[in-house]
Structures are given as structure tokens and as C-alpha cells.
DNA sequence: TTTAAATATAGGTTTGACAAATATGGTTGT
DNA sequence: ACAACCATATTTGTCAAACCTATATTTAAA
């Protein structure tokens, strides 16, 4: 039986082992890219069976904390944490929250307006040619009428991602994954069907130009016009939908 | 062999099954609080063994998507997603990133300044008595010299959490978990030792008073003074540490 | 020297069984 | 008739032993 520091059993054995290893990673006893003992060895040390060890490892793998490879030079390795790796986790959770109706569109629009305004301001100050080029490329793609709706959505996300990157602030980039990966698609999902992509592209261009000439207020103005537009389209879609269901 | 929609095998079987169930949850085929088939039944349906099913379920459990109970009325249930449940995941990942030195203190301070300014502004507009009382209680606790350093830190986190809650914006609250649970402790870790808690409490009080009278600019001013102070203390700590190691 | 095959080592999967927890339902005593 | 209690069925949790599969290293042959 595995005991924690209190000598009290908390949760299943697999959970205890997972927590134990997680702690070791978090407080640095296990370094990045370090190789853990083999599953057999872990089972022996913890005094549990190999399947239980595997359950524990799977929990950690689901959190992107470890990764396993087969073969002689294989084994279980501590993952180097990367903001991008978090993207999936945060996106899944936020999407679920949105899907269950935890947030309404006004809240989301407000959050986007405030947080993306920060990005505009910092991007205007710190942007490099690299991110400007990335944003330019997305605008070009979005301008092409041959671009499908799915591609347009994906490009929209990449455009805003580049804007965040242009702010050159790691912690902010981490936080913005939530809004980028979850809230932007949610906002767009209802809008894109209206086929008013030209307007969106035009506002994207205004934002990019403003950021390029380091004109933060203009960038924020364009952002707010974009969000106002999206919100209006959302309401229009709702109205249309209501009228359709009433008929 | 389990195949995905492309007919191509991607990752281990357990991973495929986990992804399959996750998708079912995310696009609503599995409702909240719904009971999944038993592990045996799942194994039969997917054509795999029960331990493999269990590995898949553990991955999902690690993401707080499902929960299992034993007994006749037990089984595996789809969890209702809650923002608080995400806290742990985001915190762990962000703490890891900070711990590995992915961010420097200036980036963190900048991110805090910008994002918490938003909270100040929205809180000044939307705050209710409930959150004001919560912040007041934390200030009282922080003023008590009998409060230990650990308690002071925890109280500091709760104070800022209440500030975020006062903004009354769910999506923003979700995003702010990162800064609240990971960045604030990191910022404080080095500072609290200097025992200059009075100054911090005083600035907390300025923030609370400004929010109470809906004076957003004053709240933001107090916030910026707080962060300037923390940054100065951080630099002083570094200098002291350098001098000590040089001696 | 280069290439190809054998081998050892690690995780991945299966089978089968038993343990532990717990709601259900029947039994017994009042 | 009703309530307390216990047996049981169901479901997850854990274990054990074996085999499969992928892969780096080593070895042998061209």
C-alpha cells in the first residue's frame, strides 16, 4: 500500500503514484528530458504492479508531462513543457465550457476586446518583420475567394496568433491560448456562414497596417470595429434563426 | 486494430480510444453526467482488452473529463466541466514553464500589469458587495502580523482572485487562472522574504478602495505601484544575493 | 567500409483472475 | 406492516504472467 506524507491513503494507488511523479517533476527532482526508470523498475520501487504503473504514466502523458518511446533507447521521458503543448488541453476544456453554455457571447466579446487590445498595444511596440509577414500571408489567404470556410477560420486563428506573438511576451502568449484557440473559433462559427468575409479581411488589414506603423490606437480601433461587426453578425444570425423557426 | 476516419493508425490503441471518447464528449454525443458503458462493454465494442480501455479512461480522467465510481450503480460518468477544475491543470503547466525559466520577471510583470489592469477596470464597473467583502477580509488577514508568510502568500492569491471575480466576466476569469495561480506566486516567492508586507497591504487597500468607489484609474495606479514595488524588491533581492555569493 | 541481419531492450497489449466498494433486494426480527 | 440488517450482484481497482512490436545496438557478411 502506497502512503502519502500523512500516512493516509488518498485516492487510488495509480493516482497516488501519478501525483508522486508529478511532484518530482514539478519541484525539479526530475529534470527535463530525463529518463525515468523502466515501468518494471517503477513497479518494483513503488511496490505495485506494472499495469498500475502504466495507468499512472498514462495520466501524466495525458497532461503532456511525459512521453514514452519503445526500444532499447526508449523509455519514459520528462517532456520539456511548451506553451504550444498546453494549447490542446486549454482548448479542449474551454471549448467544453463554451459548448455547455457556461459563457454568453457578450462576455466573450468583452474578454476578446480587452485582452486583444493589450496584444495590439504591445505588438505595435515590439513587432518584428517576422510576425508582420505572417499576418500579411494570412490576409492574402483570406482575400482569396477560393479559400474554403474552414480554411478561412483556421487562417483567422493564425492571424490572431501571429498578432499575439508580435507582442513578444511569453506569459501573455500563454494566457492568450485560451482566447485564441477556443473563443475565436466560437465567435466565428456562427458568423462565417454569412459570407461577409471581405469586411473581416478589410479590418484585419487595418489592424496589420496600424501595427506595422506602430500606431496602437488605430490598431485597437480596428479591433473594436471587428468585434462590433462580429457581434452584429451574431445578433443578425440569431434573429434570422428565430424568424426561421417561427415560420 | 482500431482505425481512424482516414483508415490510418495514429498513436497507440489506448490513445485512439481516448481521442474517440473525447470527441464524443466534445461534440455532444455524450451528455454531461451521462454514464458510459462498463469497461467490459467498451472493450467489447472497440475490440480491445479491458486494461487498454482503462488506460484510455485514465487519460480522460486526468483531464477531468470523466470520473469513475465503483459498485452496482457505479461506472464511468462524464464530468460537468468547471473553470475551477481547469485551475489545477493550467497551474501545473504554467508553474512548470516558469520553473524551467521560460519567462523572465519583466515579461511576467508586464503581463500582470496589462491583464490585471483590465480586471481593475471591469471590477470598478461591475463589482458587487460580495467580492468587496472578500477582498476586505483578505486585507484584514494580511494586516495581521501573526499571519505566516505562507498564509500571506495564499491570501495574496485569494485577494487577486476576488478582484478577477469582481470583473464578472467568465472567459476573462478562465484566462486569469494562469496569472493568478502561477505568476502571482512566482512573483511573490522572492519578495515576501523581505518582510515588507505593510507596503503591499497598503497598496492592496488602495486598490480595494478605488474599486469600491468605481474609480478605475485610481485602481490601476495602485496596481502599477504594487507591481513597480514588487519589481524593485525583486531586483534588490537579486543584488543582495549576488553580493552574498561574491563574499 | 558499408550494408544488412540478428539481438537485446524497452514499451504495448492481452488473458485471466481476484479484491474492494457499494447499491439493491431479500430476509429476519420486532 | 415496518425497519434494521445482511447477502449478493455489479462494477471498478489491482495484480500476475505472458506475448507482441518497435527500435537501437551489435555483429556478421558482402
Image (cartoon, coloured by chain):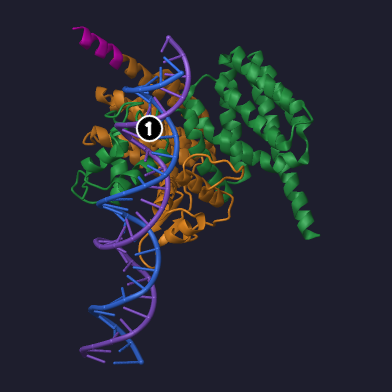
Chain colours: A green, B orange, C purple, D blue
Task: Give the left or right position of residue B107, taking residue B193 as reference.
Answer: right
Mark 1: give few (<14), some (14-19) or many (20+) Cα within 10 Å.
Answer: few
Please identify the quadrant where the C terminus of chain B is shown: top left
Kindly give the residue lying farthest to the right in the view shown.
A247
Q: Is residue B219 above or below residue C23?
A: above
Kindly give the residue lying farthest to the top in the view shown.
B247
Residue at horizontal 52%, vertical 19%?
A168
Q: Looking at this view, is D11 or A221 the one in front?
A: D11
Measuring from the top left, give residue A92's x and y in whole percent.
52, 42
In this figure, which residue is indicated by the disc labeled 1? A71
Measuring from the top left, give residue A117's x and y in whole percent.
59, 27
Residue at horizontal 63%, vertical 41%?
A186
Residue at horizontal 58%, vertical 53%?
B28
- Magenta residues (range): B237-247
Q: Is residue A76 above or below residue B25?
A: above
Identify the main secondary structure in magenta.
Answer: helix
Measuring from the top left, give residue B246's x and y in whole percent.
22, 7
Amino acid at each position: 500500500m502506497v502512503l502519502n506524507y500523512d500516512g493516509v491513503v488518498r485516492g487510488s494507488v495509480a493516482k497516488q503514484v501519478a501525483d508522486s511523479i508529478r511532484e518530482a517533476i514539478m519541484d525539479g527532482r526530475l529534470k527535463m528530458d530525463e529518463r525515468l526508470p523502466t515501468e518494471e523498475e517503477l513497479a518494483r520501487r513503488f511496490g505495485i504492479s506494472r499495469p498500475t504503473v502504466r495507468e499512472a504514466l498514462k495520466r501524466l502523458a495525458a497532461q503532456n508531462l511525459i512521453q514514452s518511446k519503445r526500444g532499447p533507447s526508449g523509455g519514459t521521458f520528462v517532456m520539456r513543457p511548451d506553451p504550444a503543448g498546453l494549447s490542446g488541453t486549454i482548448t479542449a476544456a474551454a471549448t467544453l465550457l463554451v459548448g455547455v453554455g457556461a459563457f454568453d457571447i457578450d462576455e466573450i466579446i468583452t474578454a476578446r476586446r480587452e485582452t486583444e487590445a493589450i496584444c495590439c498595444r504591445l505588438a505595435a511596440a515590439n513587432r518584428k518583420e517576422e510576425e508582420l509577414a505572417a499576418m500579411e500571408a494570412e490576409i492574402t489567404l483570406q482575400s482569396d475567394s477560393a479559400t474554403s470556410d474552414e480554411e478561412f477560420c483556421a487562417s483567422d486563428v493564425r492571424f490572431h496568433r501571429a498578432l499575439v506573438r508580435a507582442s513578444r511576451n511569453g506569459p501573455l502568449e500563454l494566457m492568450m491560448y485560451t482566447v485564441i484557440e477556443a473563443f475565436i473559433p466560437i465567435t466565428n462559427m456562427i458568423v462565417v456562414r454569412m459570407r461577409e468575409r471581405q469586411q473581416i479581411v478589410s479590418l484585419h488589414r487595418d489592424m496589420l497596417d496600424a501595427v506595422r506603423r506602430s500606431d496602437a490606437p488605430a490598431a485597437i480601433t480596428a479591433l473594436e470595429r471587428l468585434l462590433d461587426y462580429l457581434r452584429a453578425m451574431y445578433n443578425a444570425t440569431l434573429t434570422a434563426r428565430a424568424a426561421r423557426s417561427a415560420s
